[in-house]
Image (spheres, helix red, strand yellow):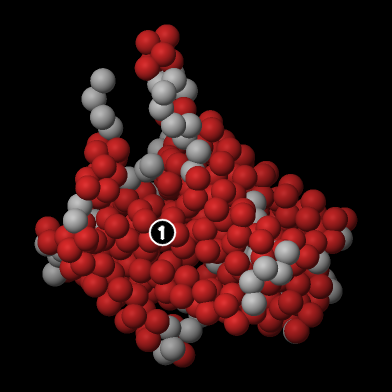
């Protein structure tokens, strides 16, 4: 049986000497640094540096191009650095933070997240969107935007163009939520607490949640931030479940079953590292200064990974996917917005 192309790529990355990844690593780091500087421009401040980095990478890839010498380092950024970043995200969360939204709030977060993910996968199948791309859009919409997409792709193993397309979709509709929600604050007659919860439960990216929620005041902003962080904790179980249920973990014949007994289970072990850090952080093992420093470093590592994603994205390949994924993202966005607000107004 032939080795799948992505496994071949992974084995090549492992066998590469360190000096081979330096050019590409310097390129992704340079793009990440530029993204951090551009984020300070007022007109770009509402976009996260992660989004800016992937846009810069796409521009470079599709204008001047990326030569062969950079590719090993770009692949390293997308594989190793990304997985380390996902593990370190655990330092942003603790169980007390999650419990702060209350049992009803957590139930609403869970119901909204699961319903949105399942609905998006169902609707994507109905309109004929690539199943792997559908799962990426479902994860980005229901959990936490770009970070959820790239983490989910560690299990789904979709094409780089699909990841870029999914990130673009959640960026578009997350930005629309960020701009529209504050305008609806008074019209919907919700309290500051309810508005913050709505932002945290339904808006895609953390930066977008903060920008929208604080328009309703300090209380709204705090509840929005905590609700958003409580969504992030579900990243681990969702990715683990997808890993177990992925097609690669199932065998279509007895021969495959016997030959795969000795193989590793398709579990994304980096997610277990994420869970471990959440638990350790909940036990106050790490000093605040250390957590703050590591969190800042990790944000830059995530930005490097997003730069790598952009540098591997070919716009012409994205165009081949058509408009259906965009329709899927729009319907999924409307679904999570309406469902979460309905649940909050009814039960919270």
At which x and y percent is residue 113?
Answer: 66, 50
Indicate the quadrant where residue 55 lies.
Answer: bottom left
Q: Is residue 91 above or below residue 297?
A: above
Check disc 1 and report the residue beneath it. 82
Looking at the picture, tell me which residue is in the foreground, 218 or 241: 241
Front residue (pair 99, 221): 99
Residue drawn at point x = 60 percent, y = 67 percent: 91
Q: Position of residue 271 (x, y in %)?
A: 54, 50
Horizontally, is 344 left or right of 337 in the view?
Answer: right
- Residue extending farthest to the top is 254
Q: Is residue 59 visible?
A: no
Which is nearer the eye, 55 or 281?
281
Q: Position of residue 115 (x, y in %)?
A: 67, 44
Residue at 84% across, 61% down: 102
**Quadrant location, the C terminus:** bottom right
Which residue is pictured at 72% across the width and 50% down the height? 110
Q: Nearer the viewer, residue 346 or 241?
A: 241
Q: Compared with residue 299, is residue 248 higher up or lower down, i.e. above or below? A: above
- Identify which residue is drawn at 50% across, 38% down: 267
Q: Secondary structure at mark 1?
A: helix
Q: Is residue 203 above or below residue 237?
A: below
Query: Measured from the top left, where is residue 333 in percent x and y?
Result: 58, 56
Image label count: 1
Badge 1: how crowded within 10 Å, few (<14), some, or many (20+)?
A: many
Q: Is residue 296 left or right of residue 301?
A: right
Residue 208 shown left or right of residue 253 in the figure:
right
Q: Quadrant of the N terminus?
A: top left
Q: Is residue 168 visible?
A: yes
């Amino acid at each position: 049986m032939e080795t799948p192309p992505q496994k071949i790529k992974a084995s090549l990355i492992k066998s590469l000497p360190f000096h081979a990844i330096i050019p590409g690593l310097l390129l992704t780091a340079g793009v990440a640094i530029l993204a951090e500087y551009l984020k300070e421009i007022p007109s770009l401040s509402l976009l996260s540096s992660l989004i800016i980095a992937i846009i810069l990478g796409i521009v470079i890839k599709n204008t001047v191009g990326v030569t062969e010498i950079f590719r090993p380092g770009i692949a390293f950024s997308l594989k190793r650095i990304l997985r380390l970043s996902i593990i370190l995200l655990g330092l942003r969360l603790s169980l007390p933070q999650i419990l702060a939204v209350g049992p009803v709030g957590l139930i609403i977060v869970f119901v909204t997240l699961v319903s949105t993910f399942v609905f998006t996968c169902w609707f994507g199948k109905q309109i004929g969107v690539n199943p792997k791309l559908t799962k990426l859009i479902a994860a980005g919409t229901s959990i936490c935007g770009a970070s959820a997409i790239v983490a989910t792709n560690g299990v789904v193993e979709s094409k780089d163009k699909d990841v870029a397309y999914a990130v673009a979709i959640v960026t578009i509709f997350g930005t629309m939520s960020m701009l529209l929600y504050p305008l609806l604050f008074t019209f919907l007659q919700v309290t500051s607490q309810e508005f913050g919860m709505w932002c945290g439960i339904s808006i895609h990216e953390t930066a977008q949640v903060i920008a929208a929620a604080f328009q309703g005041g300090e209380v709204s902003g705090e509840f929005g931030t905590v609700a958003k962080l409580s969504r992030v904790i579900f990243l681990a179980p969702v990715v683990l479940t997808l890993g177990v249920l992925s097609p690669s973990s199932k065998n279509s014949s007895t021969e495959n079953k016997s030959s795969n007994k000795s193989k590793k289970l398709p579990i994304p072990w980096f997610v277990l590292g994420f869970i471990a850090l959440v638990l350790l952080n909940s036990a106050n093992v790490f000093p605040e200064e250390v957590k703050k420093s590591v969190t800042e470093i990790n944000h830059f590592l995530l930005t490097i990974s997003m730069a790598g994603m952009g540098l591997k994205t070919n716009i012409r390949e994205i165009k081949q996917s058509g408009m259906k994924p965009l329709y899927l993202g729009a319907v999924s966005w409307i679904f999570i917005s309406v469902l979460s607000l309905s649940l909050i107004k009814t039960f919270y």
